[in-house]
Each structure stands twice: as structure tokens, then as C-alpha cells.
Amino acid sequence: MTKCILVTGGSRGIGRAICEKLATDTQYHIIINYQSNEKAALETLQKVKDLGGAGEILKFDVANVDEVKNALTEWELQNPNTIVEAIVNNAGITRDSLFMWMSYQDWDKVIKTSLDGFFNVTNFFIQKMLRNRYGRIVNIASVSGVKGTAGQTNYSAAKGALVAATKALAQEVAKRNITVNAVAPGFIRTDMTSELDEKELVKLIPSGRFGEAEEVADLVSFLISPKSGYITGEVININGGIYS
């Protein structure tokens, strides 16, 4: 039986760093989810293989419940001797603006990607994890979901709800040796933050720098490992001291 981990939004940024770290730290077959950028997903897969890991890419939009069900059901049918033992719910998008000018479309898309994405993917696998009496679920939240960030009411709402869902689900499944934790990054140097004024923002960060995606990946890898079995329902900030 091949044991697998699914990383949503795994083609770039933090998701790619997580896939690479899992390739070196675990024996999991890594399922790299992507929505549209197949080239980037294949590049991530090649990096995983170069590091001695195994994996594949799998296309679906986490926000679309039918697309998720169809893709994962088909994948299971094609891979009968596999089990998804861990999930990293990393997929997320930003559509920043002040709330007074925010369109419903920008509100809805951000909420659905982070929050519905968590539900659609995790709900598909949770009964199987319960039957197998083992699982690791890590949700990538944000400092915005813990303290709120002006100009990100939609993103803060999505990630804040993800934090609450993490705490609730952790209590439901803990007796079956399934942990559910959230990681809340601050300013991490990725494509998503490339347009920010880093020189000005670092003045707000006690550590005086942006974080690296690899640092988030290190934390996720630990939470996926058997070493973290007594940690569940936690939201771990990784933000250089900007908020804790």
C-alpha cells in the first residue's frame, strides 16, 4: 500500500517549498495539486524527483466541489493500492482592496478558495482517515486570519474561518490519531508578496526580514511527521514576531 500526501496549490511558492521538503523528509508519494499552471506543477514534480522523492501532478480547482470529487474519485479508481494519509491545504488567493470598494466576486473567490477548498478536499478523505485511525491535516492560514489586516477583509475572513475550522475538526477526530493544525505565516518571500514594498514592511517586523518559504515548509514537515502526534488544534504563527 503506497502512502500519499496531497498538497493543494503545490506548484509554486510555499506549496512548492512544502513539496520539496516532504520529498527529503518523508517517504510519502506526493500528489501536487494545481489549478491552471501545469508548467509550474511539472517543475515542482521534477524538483521532488531530483530530491529522491516520488510524486505526480493532479489538476482541479479546490473551490469547485464537483471538480474536486470527480478528480479525486477518478484518482482513487486509478490507484487502488494507495492511501492518502496526510493533507496540506495550502491553496489560497488574494484579491486585496478596501472593503468599501470590494466586489462580491473578489469576496466570494477568496472565501471559496481557502475555506471551501479546505472543506472540499478534507471532507473527501476524512472518513477514510477515521477508518484507518491515522491522519495528518495541516491548513495554511495567515497572520491576516489571526489578527486581521486592513485591505484584506476577504482574506482575513477566509483564513480566520480556517483557523476556527482547524480547532473544531481537531476535537472531532483526535481520538482516531488524526491531528489537525494550522500554520499562520506572516510576510513570506513568494510570488504572492513580490509586489509588496519589502523595505518598508520589514520595519514592522521585529526580526527585520521577510521569511522564506522553506522556513514554513520546515514547520509543515514537522507537523506531518509522527513526532507531532500530541500537537493538535494548534495555530502556529511563523511571522518574525510581527504578531504572536
Image (tube, rainbow, N blue to C red):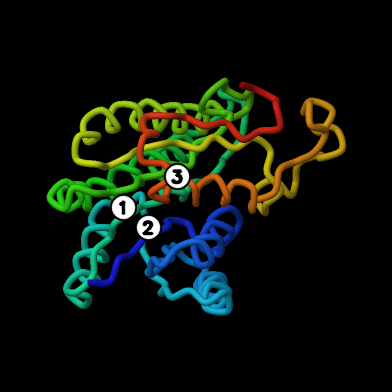
Tell which tag, 1 or 3, sits nearer the viewer. Answer: 3
Q: Quadrant location of the C terminus?
A: top right
Three-letter amino acid code at the position of disc 2:
Asp
Q: Quadrant location of the N terminus?
A: bottom left
Secondary structure under badge 3?
Answer: helix
Residue ranking furthest to the front: 227
Secondary structure under badge 1?
Answer: loop
Residue at 33% x, 30% y is 165
Q: Position of residue 82 (x, y in %)?
A: 23, 70
Callout 2 environment at 10 Å: few (<14), some (14 to 19), or many (20+)?
A: many
Q: CA distance from mark 2 to mark 3?
A: 25 Å
Vertical relation: 103 (above or below) 84: above
Three-letter amino acid code at the position of disc 3:
Leu
Residue that mark 2 sits on: 61
Q: CA distance from mark 1 to mark 3?
A: 27 Å
Give the mark nearest the N terminus, 2 or 3.
2
Disc number placed over residue 64 in the picture, else none: 1
Callout 1 environment at 10 Å: few (<14), some (14 to 19), or many (20+)?
A: some
Disc number placed over residue 223 in the picture, else none: 3
Q: Could you tell me how many numbered marks the image carries?
A: 3
Q: Are marks 1 and 2 in contact (CB under 8 Å)?
A: yes
Residue at 22% x, 58% y is 69
Three-letter amino acid code at the position of disc 1:
Asn
Tell which tag, 2 or 3, sits nearer the viewer. Answer: 3
Q: Position of residue 118 (x, y in %)?
A: 35, 43
Give the mark nearest the N terminus, 1 or 3.
1
Q: CA distance from mark 1 to mark 2?
A: 6 Å
Location of residue 6 (image quadrant): bottom left
